[in-house]
């Protein structure tokens, strides 16, 4: 696994996969990514981010990067009507638009 503690680099990698850098919080401590796209991101701690819904990030987030998508996502939850659901898939339109699709449940 390639590894880095350079925070700006993880956001650059997201952009290389046609994913918006804003899908991650700004408290990334370190990350690693394997040649098959499997990644692990360590945050400085858990956090909550307000998008259209409240999103929870655990101290460790992992999954598989694909062009325009993240699958098998772990460590991310979304709140809908006071119930928390695990987010397991994120996708964007290709070519890129402002829409991010989230599969949870």
Image: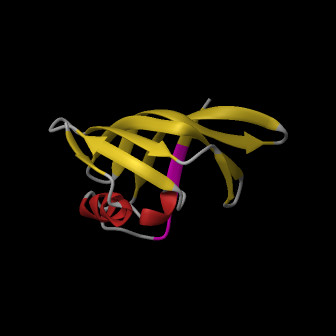
Q: In the figure, 61 relative to 9: above or below?
A: above
Image quadrant occupied by the N terminus: top left
Q: Give how far across and how far down residue 49 sits, in percent.
A: 67, 56
Queried whether the magenta region covers residue 84, the answer comes back as: no
The answer to which of 49 and 43 lies nearer the viewer is 43
Q: Position of residue 60 (x, y in %)?
A: 49, 36
Q: Residue at x 55, y 48 (%)?
A: 44
Residue 86 quadrant:
top right
> Which residue is rendered at x = 45% and y = 42% of the image?
42
Task: Give the colour scheme of this rendering.
Answer: secondary structure
Q: Position of residue 85 (x, y in %)?
A: 67, 33
Q: Is residue 34 left or right of residue 80?
A: left
Give the magenta-colored segment's residue range: 98-102
In the picture, measured across the screen, residue 91 lies left or right of residue 68, that is right
The extreme right residue here reads 82
Determine which quarter of the picture holds residue 80: top right
Please report the residue visible at 30 percent of the width from the left and 67 percent of the height from the top. Answer: 95
**Residue 60 relative to residue 4: left or right:** right
Q: Is any part of residue 88 visible from this angle? A: no
Q: Toward the viewer: 45 or 62?
A: 45
């Amino acid at each position: 696994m390639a590894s880095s503690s350079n925070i700006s680099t993880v956001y650059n990698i997201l952009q290389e996969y046609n994913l918006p850098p804003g899908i991650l919080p700004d408290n990334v401590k370190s990350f690693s990514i394997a040649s098959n796209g499997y990644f692990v991101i360590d945050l400085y701690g858990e956090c909550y981010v307000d998008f259209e819904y409240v999103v929870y990030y655990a101290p460790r987030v992992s999954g598989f990067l694909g062009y325009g998508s993240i699958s098998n996502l772990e460590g991310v939850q979304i709140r809908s009507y006071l119930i928390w659901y695990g987010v397991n898939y994120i996708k964007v339109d290709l070519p890129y638009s402002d829409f991010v699709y989230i599969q949870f449940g």
